[in-house]
Image (cartoon, rainbow, N blue to C red):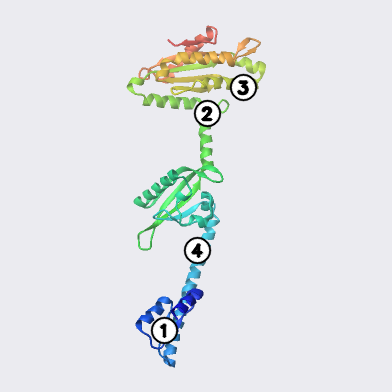
Amino acid sequence: MIAQVVRLREICGDRLYLVAVTGSATSEFQAELFDAGVDDLLMEEGTPQLLRCLLRAKRHLTLLQTHEKTLAALQDKLDAWQDGLDHLPTPIYLKDVGGRYLGCNTAFSHFVGTERDRVIGHTLADFLPPDVAEAHRESDLEVMRRGGAIRLETDVCVPDTGVRHIMLHKACVASPEGGLRGIAGVLIDITERKELEARLTAAAERDPLTNAYNRRKFFQVAGSAIETANEGERSFAVAVIDIDHFKSINDELGHGEGDVTLCSIVDTLRAHEEEGVLIARAGGEEFFAFFTGDNASQAAAILERMRADIARYCAVVTGIGTVGTISIGLADFDPLQETIDHALRRADLALYRAKRDGRNRLCRAD
């Protein structure tokens, strides 16, 4: 009989209210019946006993139906929430305190490159490289220690689109008892915004034609270098560089050729850029150079190499002869004794001497 009860319960599940009619039975046998899956026992004959048994069965089935209706209503609400989350393009997830996913939307499963059923019950280490997963786990632990919410930006590699820059919001989720249930998170893809910021920054810092730093960026970088220099590293130099007879290139060969020559000269100047050497377009065909540290003492040699390379690779011939070379005025300065503006004025005077003395040369300021 015990085996039959077990088999019947396996077939019908919990929807069947199973009553065993046993007559007189030992307490041990009754316990075995209940362990096998029996819901009630009818041990005495007679209508009153049968009626009481049926009433108990009715009450059980009524409670079961009420429970099923409650579960169905909750499932409908859960399905509605899940459907709403799945229509959002923003990845959303919920983790337990151990880092295992309790739920997520379709956008998140696409983000990690797998189906949602394979996300639930797993950790981020199952989808991302160990070092990346560990970094996110550390931020999870941090928000759980601090409570509340945190926001951070990071780069992640997405299966379909490659590296993306995301803003990640994480918040602690409390349990009904007041403890910590886990962490909810939202991932916002800000790659396009970051790219736009980079373009705007470049537009604010660089000359649009040559891509060299502009005048504003030159003074910003130079000023920062001067402010942060140590007492023993206050050796600086500035140079003003001008293209010789540039107007004749535009007049005779056209502004298109003038732009090509200008860009070629800038590329040659910037080929000598390194730590402690900065080239910027001051405007028109004029450029500034700034030298710090050991390069300040080597500024004349560096500028001479620039001048020689430009004369060799960038010069063109017009009706007045060879043009497109550069003339340079160089000034060493100590920021404790004078400002960079004053040093540039001295370099500009030296540039005029270089022009007067025949161009395509460097003159050092007095």
- Type of the residue with mark 3: Val
Q: Are marks 1 and 4 in contact (CB under 8 Å)?
A: no
Q: Nearer the viewer, mark 2 or mark 3?
A: 3
- Type of the residue with mark 1: Leu
| Residue that lies at the very extreme toward the bottom in this rendered image | 46
Residue at the spot of label 2 = 206
C-alpha separation, residue under disc 3 versus residue under disc 1: 100 Å
How crowded is the residue under tag 1: few (<14 C-alpha within 10 Å), some, or many (20+)?
A: some
Q: Nearer the viewer, mark 2 or mark 4?
A: 4
Q: Nearer the viewer, mark 1 or mark 4?
A: 1
Q: Is residue 358 left or right of residue 334?
A: right
C-alpha separation, residue under disc 1 versus residue under disc 2: 89 Å
Q: Are marks 2 and 3 in contact (CB under 8 Å)?
A: no
C-alpha separation, residue under disc 1 versus residue under disc 4: 38 Å
Residue, x 50% and y 9% (percent of image)? 353
Q: Disc 3 on helix, strand or loop?
A: helix
How crowded is the residue under tag 2: few (<14 C-alpha within 10 Å), some, or many (20+)?
A: many
Mark 3 or 4 closer to N-term? 4
Q: Nearer the viewer, residue 149 or 6?
A: 6
Q: Nearer the viewer, mark 3 or mark 1?
A: 1
Residue at the spot of label 4 = 78
Residue at the spot of label 3 = 260
Where is residue 244? Give x, y as percent. 57, 13
